[in-house]
Image (tube, rainbow, N blue to C red):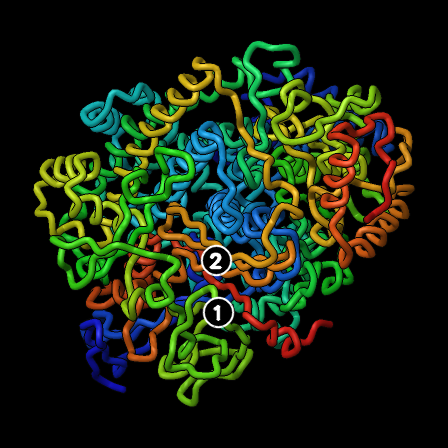
Amino acid sequence: MGAGTETFYEVIRRQGITRRSFVKFCSLTATSLGLGPIGATEIAQALETKPRVPVIWMHGLECTCCSESFIRSAHPLVKDAVLSMISLDYDDTIMAAAGHQAEAILQETREKYKGQYILAVEGNPPLNEDGMFCIDGGRPFVEKLKEMAEDSMAVIAWGACASWGCVQAAKPNPTQATPIDKVIRNKPIIKVPGCPPIAEVMTGVVTYITTFGRLPELDRQGRPKMFYSQRIHDKCYRRPHFDAGQFVEEWDDDAARKGYCLYKMGCKGPTTYSACSTVRWNGGVSFPIQSGHGCIGCTEDGFWDNGSFYDRLTTIKQFGVEANADKIGATVAGVVGAAIAAHAAVTTVRSMAKRRNDNGGNGNGNKPNDKSAG
Amino acid sequence: MTNITTPNGFSLDNAGRRVVVDPVTRIEGHLRVEVNVDANNVIRNAVSTGTMWRGIEVILRGRDPRDAWAFTERICGVCTGTHALTSVRAVENALDIKIPENANTIRNIMQLTLQVHDHIVHFYHLHALDWVDIVSALSADPKATSTLAQSISNWPLSSPGYFKDLQTRLKKFVESGQLGPFKNGYWGHPAYKLPPEANLMAVAHYLEALDFQKDMVKIHTIYGGKNPHPNWLVGGVPCAINVDGVGAVGAVNMERLNLVSSIIDQMVTFTEQVYLPDLQAIASFYKDWTFGGGLSSTSVMSYGDIPEYANDYSAASLKMPRGVILNGNLNEVLPVDLADPSQVQEFVTHSWYKYPDETKGLHPWDGVTVPHYELGPKSKGTKTRIEAVDEEAKYSWIKSPRWKGNAVEVGPLARYIIGYAQNKPEFKEPTEKLLKDLGLPVTALFSTLGRTAARALEAQWAAHQLRYFQNKLMASLKAGDSATANVEKWSPETWPKEVKGVGFTEAPRGALGHWIKIKDGKIDNYQAVVPTTWNGSPRDPKGGIGAFEASLLETPMADPNQPLEILRTLHSFDPCLACSTHVLSEDGQEMSRVTVR
């Protein structure tokens, strides 16, 4: 139980942050909220004394990778997040209670914390078969989801499932798995996509809300700008190799061993908005590209249906690092269209391999956009 | 039905009071269980219902087989990676792709890391609260707790002050009234038997394990780029190795290898100084709780895993045991052949799917799946408000896989029983030592506690195997071999027009198989038969019951309104429901039956 009933202030003090820094933090927060010096005092007071925000964490059709990712958080440690910063009153994956005792918590939270709790949703509701492809407490999950959303303060959509639909919504989506913003219409929804999202991104979003008492700034697609406003490619440490035309041509070749760019191996970093190349994974140890595999684009809407993960992106126009999330919305839609057109035809990889053979295995690194979608 | 005997030898009686647990929590996915208890509150009938279906395999049809690992990996984020490994093995089997030795070694390291991680997280964060009463820890004497901890282990976090601080924080936490995940738990339930000191020690280790689990997975991050859901590759592994050449900092290099090595050392230490001593200490207070054996004393199965040699999946190469035991005959371990259409078959008589002839089972290569949700005439409630299912009709989204017609249990206990029966010292000796230390006969293994103990023993075994394979990788690099991928058949143009293959692993929860058919470079059929499908299956056409249902029978409940005993036994299987519910038809007919939007 580590930190017991510690408030946010006690937690940061225990973690070595001085009173002075804390006060400064509160002033900056107040300034950014436009509250002035009195606001700073109020924020400090709130952080020092307020009870933990109740969080109801529900699971629809999913694989639990979001929960697994969440518990990997290194800063804050998940025990501090769960035991000191929020009150995780319901989460079927880790809660002690089951059956009736678990169900009772949902009802109690709705009544006792009406309009004050955060609903965190992992997975999504299937709408086919009257919702009975996902049964919870003997009835459709989608009903419980809507009920709990009704009295919540705000909703967090964890991962690609809740945000976009993810793998069970990939074509032909047999259960009609549906992103939660299609069934919850009247609450603010923060989408934290990824399969799963990075642990520290997840705890970062939660602690932002509990710390600042407001929702993070979102882009047009509903994602927090602080983590999703730049592409992996923009901050990739292999970017200089892309710019220099130095590419991995096949797995485990000399270029792979030198850590060259994975663009030709199908890397989706250039069109994927995520903090992978900056925050990195599991306490900053690595991220997919650093460990030799291209990005599969798992934070992007519909990434399962954009052709093979090994198909080379064909539509990027070397857009600059300054492009923002709002601009890319349209660009991504273009990529999806092209990839779907390619889907029924011969795979890109096949024609790529053929071309390589024709060229004696020597691709032209300086022209990454040299081919059509196949 | 009131009183019947199943073909696999269990008595079922549904005359008594019906108790429903839904949702079953502290598992992966959605599960419902209904039991009937007699006048003495002893369970006489058990009905396990998988309550979710995602259709991943339908979605795989027509896609690039080299992508299948990523789709199937998302079947489960708890046993993350094991489906991906099974998938690349199935594709490689179909296309006759040979992987380099280093790739086999690194895959084993990934898989063994999962075993240790998953077992530790299961024991402390999903299962412990079935044995450990958190509230009781408040009345522990920190000094006595320290004495207890130091008497069973050299683990350094064991001083009286350490436990006192923890208890103070725990007290503040409980007094806050915001109990978070511990709210509405079964604290004070008479089935809890640990003294306060053992409870306090276990709470400390619950939190320590929570801290440590995030570090263990860094091995996946190094070789696979992230966790959960690291990256894999048909033909090898995606991470290139470059220990001392130009650009080594961009690949798996000395610093990365050292990080892996140091984490392995910590995993060995944690399993030996925390996990196993805790298991033994807790078990010593529950020796009288002998329930939950179910199928384990008669029918168990393991496919085997962790090949010593690349591309050799024979029983001789596999370091985890392979085989089947039937009728409790430990003198004979039967061979398993996943390609034999008469061995592994799935039935749907009691599942929410339709077959042309539901008296027959189908081998996964020829699987047919048409979702068909309906409740039987004896069910209670409505289609969207289930009060009680009718187990004589269809009642689960899980199919019923059978081995030559037999329901079998899979998982760590099955593996240990088979290894024991095969007289493999690495499995038999630690098992015998643990039993001897606890003063228990070998038959005590066939229980809920046996399942939980086998998992702990296996975590220790896996931690040492990690050390072995990391050393093997270093030896290979020393000898000048740093190959990690074979790209000869990367291009679909090199593939035959039509092939089929099967891949298997031992997931933490048990035997896992993927069957694939590839036609014209695309997936034509894909089927996964997973551990929880075996363990959590509904009844088969003959009425044989699966492992979950069998294990709950004859268990006395102190209070049927507080289903602690049910949770305890179900959790001992480490259920994974997202894994267990799946589908793909041979001819794709179901696609026209399901309305999409």
Question: Is residue B7 placed above or below B63 in the rendered structure?
Answer: below
Which label number is shown at residue B515?
2
Dot 1 and dot 2 within a common chain:
yes
Q: Secondary structure at mark 2?
A: strand
- Residue type at mark 2 is Trp
Residue B489, given in percent of the width and then of the height, sits at 59, 41
Residue A12, image quadrant: top right
Classify the position of the C terminus of chain B by image quarter: bottom right
Specify the quadrant of the image occupied by residue B390: bottom left
User: In this image, A252 relative to B569: left or right?
Assistant: right
- Which x, y percent locates residue B239? 58, 28
Res B68 seen here: yes
Residue at the image position 25 percent from the left and 30 percent from the top: B141
Query: Which amino acid type corresponds to the residue marked 1 in the rendered image?
Result: Gly
| Dot 2 crowding, Cα within 10 Å, few <14, some 14–19, many 20+ | many
SS at badge 1: loop
Mark drawn on residue B367: 1
Q: Residues within 10 Å of mark 1 (few under 14, many from 20)?
A: many
Residue B432 as seen in the image, left or right of residue A154: left
Earlier residue among tags 1 and 2: 1
| Labels 1 & 2 near each other (Cβ < 8 A) | yes
Residue A324 at what x, y percent from top left? 88, 36
Q: In this view of the protein, which residue sits in the foreground, B491 or B152?
A: B491
